[in-house]
Amino acid sequence: MPELPEVETIASDLRPHLVGRTIVSCELRFPTIVRHPEPEVFADLIAGHRIESVKRRGKYILLALGEERLLVVHLGMTGQLRLVSPETPIPDHTHAIFTLDDGRHLRYRDPRRFGRLLLGTEAGLREARAMPKLGPEPIDPDFTGDALYQALRRRRAPLKAVLLDQKALAGVGNIYADESLHRARLRPDRIAEGVSRKSARRLHESLRESLETAIRNRGSSVDTYRDAWGEVGGQQEVLLVYGRAGQPCFTCGRPLSAVRIAGRTTVFCRRCQH
Ligand SMILES: [Zn+2]
């Protein structure tokens, strides 16, 4: 599933190509991929609008159309947003095609269909419960180690569960939760409220390191993730624990353990993480 680094890679690759372009039409081949508003309204409202900016918030890609309206893309498990020339063959599971004023296509493809497209103002989408209220961005310079400590102190849940909670912290998923906890030498099943200020600061630092390294490596293609040009990322080659259950820990050599926390497979080292 694409997380913060993967979504950031797509948004920053698309930005110089999309800003200033106008969406001339929108073809919905699988209309229910649009969750808000009704698909017919969505297609009508979107045509003729100029893309003013391309941003990322958590795992969402936000295209600003005009003053306040946002086209929001969440890639779910297997979503891919690609910018291609119109002659490019249309692969299976392509659910939406936005034609730009330079003729190119911005296409949304999603075999498992857990992703979604939304259109509205930020407040309107939140009111319609189409988008949750997201927590702070872990790589935002204003988000400090002490802010993370305060957030953890209020929670009686395992650390891993808090990191996955988009209302607590936006953009972290299974890969970078496990990677950050390993770097911070903290067990994923530790109860958040019991973590010391010092450990919280270490976790904050580890989150930044894991996420920023992954952005530099253009994300992890552990499954179907591809960037806006259809290419794989590089971070999957250097992951410390994710997907490595049973393989030796790079620090101590002991086989890594796998447990289930918050419904997700969680990999960690029983010797290095406390
Ligand atoms: Zn170890």
Image (cartoon, rainbow, N blue to C red):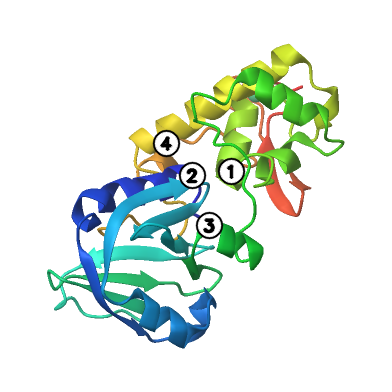
- Seen at 48% across and 44% down, the residue is 4
Camera-side residue of 49 and 183: 49
Labels 1 and 4: the sequence-earlier one: 1
Q: Which residue is mark 3?
A: 122
Labels 4 and 3: the sequence-earlier one: 3
Mark 2 secondary-structure assignment: helix
Q: Which residue is mark 4?
A: 214
Nearest to the eye among marks 2 and 1: give it: 1
Is the residue under label 2 in contact with that under label 4 (CB below 8 Å)? Answer: yes
Residue type pointed to by label 1: Ala
Q: CA distance from mark 4 to mark 3?
A: 28 Å
Residue 94 in view in this figure: no
Q: Which residue is mark 1?
A: 170
Residue 54 located left or right of residue 184: left
Mark 1 secondary-structure assignment: loop
- Seen at 70% across and 52% down, the residue is 264
Camera-side residue of 188 and 22: 22
Mark 4 secondary-structure assignment: helix
Labels 3 and 1: the sequence-earlier one: 3
CB at disc 2 and ligand 1 closer than 8 Å:
no
Q: CA distance from mark 3 to mark 1?
A: 16 Å
Residue type pointed to by label 4: Ala
Labels 3 and 2: the sequence-earlier one: 2
Task: Locate the C terminus by quadrant.
Answer: top right
> Which residue extends farthest front?
67
Hey, which quadrant is residue 146 in on the image? top right
